[in-house]
Image (spheres, coloured by chain):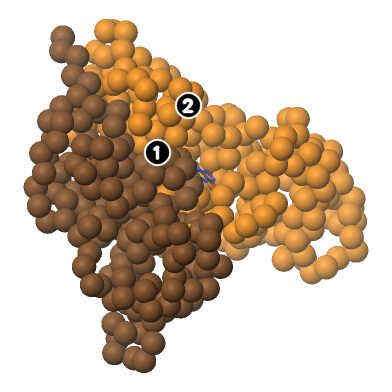
Chain colours: A orange, B brown
Amino acid sequence: MLSFDFEYYKPASIDEAVQLFQSLDRQGKNPSYISGGTELITLGRVNKIVTGAVIDIKAIPECLVLEKQGTQLVFGAAQSLTVVREKQFFPLLSKAIVEIADHTARNKITLGGNICANIIYREAVLPLLLTDSTLAVAGLNGLIQYPINDIFQQTLQLDRGEFLVQVITHKQETELPFVCLKKRRQWDVGYPLLTAAALNKNGQIKLAISGLCSFPFRDKRMEYSLNNRSLSMKARIEEAVSRIPAPVLNDVHGSAEYRVFVLENTLQEILAEWEGAGDA
Amino acid sequence: MHNHTSAEITLNINNEDRTVYVRNADTLLYALREKLGLTGAKPGCLNGDCGACTIIVDGDPMKSCLMLAVEAQGKSIITVEGLQNTAIQTEFIDKFAFQCGYCTPGFIMNCHALMTKYPDADDSVIKDWLESNICRCTGYQEIEAAIKAALAAAKGEPG
Ligand SMILES: Cc1cc2nc3c(=O)[nH]c(=O)nc-3n(C[C@H](O)[C@H](O)[C@H](O)COP(=O)(O)OP(=O)(O)OC[C@H]3O[C@@H](n4cnc5c(N)ncnc54)[C@H](O)[C@@H]3O)c2cc1C
Ligand code: FES
Ligand code: FES
């Protein structure tokens, strides 16, 4: 149960949702979009999210699309992680999803909700960064598509009143060989110590990581080091680790040193997958 | 401009339409227990972690602490009160799959949905689904035995 009260709206179109947001915002109701709504409850319970009006996007047809359109795959933001996974359109995304939360929770958590989450992990973002997916965002200027690697900078950079409608991925990218490794301190479910996802495109490794820093990221300089085959495997990993783009988390789930240690071993597993044990 | 933060809604629970007055901020778990007297779904963590509050919504197991009551309008809700003498209930008794019983309704609902959706569920599907619920008393072996026996019984195989 939440301690604060809010109005609840379930618009049936993108335009209605955008207009509702504007009008509720003008009335000072601090409106909030929801898709799965689970984070509204889990963070709202402890007053980390407070809103006077909720706009539920689950009745907007564009947010529920899940189909192949020519050479592209389109995922509606309000589709549950279970449904996206079971569709098996995008094996790396399915693999990342199956490690998020647990089966029952995934029936409610949505793809859009995970991407826009306040929690730091947002593991469904990793496959999208690696495949240079596109995000369709609705706002006062209509529905606009942005490359995820431009619009996702630590968090999804939305203007006030905008919301995520769809994720669009080139089918070709989803067919590339991949590795996705979620490392937890214990148990088989729940949040990671870190999750690393990698894609192999024509021998070049792309890498995205969650749980290492306070946001999920893909870093081109780390990728460059990992792909620098003029160095030994050990040196490539060391150089990649020296290029982590932000402070490494140091919390009750694991010290920064431990996380780096786990990352080094994880990178070794990834390289071994495509290059054998090597000289590390 | 109106300020509607609560409403009278209709929920279809165990094949019966029930009218209930809720705050938009009420979880389905709270509405079921405190407004409708259906106390089978148990409050545990209230945070989506333990599965004690699991019910079935449109055929899928859901943690009722993660759903607002207003979100459940127009959906078919089954709580443990709606199950009677099902295969999984029988097998939970036969296999001694509970001790204190607090987690049991949640497990039963998850297992019942699993059996309905995947009557041929293999070990990996069973593991994936059952990891959603926590039991602090048993060693899970008995619960696993119960779901396997119930699946076998539903197929007419010896359990
Ligand atoms: C038991 C449990 C375990 C979990 N384990 C993991 C895990 O292992 N890994 C992981 O990554 N996450 C995990 N999570 C976190 C979960 O993925 C996030 O909380 C996610 O935000 C929930 O999705 P939702 O659809 O319910 O979000 P919602 O509650 O709908 O929204 C979350 C946030 O995003 C905003 N938002 C939602 N949709 C949109 C949209 N379309 N456009 C713009 N903004 C939007 C909302 O305003 C809100 O601030 C777990 C959660 C639970 C309950
Ligand atoms: S009370 Fe709902 S998952 Fe624990
Ligand atoms: S029987 Fe006591 S928690 Fe499961």
Residue that label 2 marks? A46
- Asked if residue A196 shows in the view, the reply is no
| Residue at horizontal 36 percent and vertical 48 percent from the top | B42
Among the 4 quarters of the image, the one containing residue B68 = top left
Q: Secondary structure at mark 2?
A: loop
Label 2 marks a residue whose chain is: A
Q: Residue at x 16, y 51 (%)?
A: B13
Residue A78 placement (x, y as % from top left): 33, 42
In the foreground, A213 or A168:
A213
Left/right of residue A244 with respect to residue A8 in the rendered view: right
The yes-or-no answer for disc 2 within 8 Å of ligand 1 is no
- Which image quadrant shows ligand 1? top left
* Label 1 SS: helix
Do the numbered discs 1 and 2 sit on residues whose CB atoms are within 8 Å? no
Q: Is residue A223 above or below residue A29?
A: below
Label 1 Cα crowd, 10 Å radius (few <14 / some 14-19 / many 20+): many
Name the kind of residue labelled 2 in the image: Val
- Residue A8 placement, left or right of A44: left
x and y percent of residue B15 in the render?
A: 12, 56
Q: Is residue A275 above or below residue A266?
A: below
Q: Is residue A124 visible?
A: yes
**Residue A38 - label:** 1
Q: Pick whichever of labels 1 and 2 is earlier in the sequence.
A: 1
Instruction: Please state the horizontal and vertical placement of residue A174, each as a whole percent of the image.
Output: 50, 57
Q: Residue at coordinates 48% horizontally, 47% vertically from top-left? A: B49
Q: Amino acid at mark 1?
A: Thr
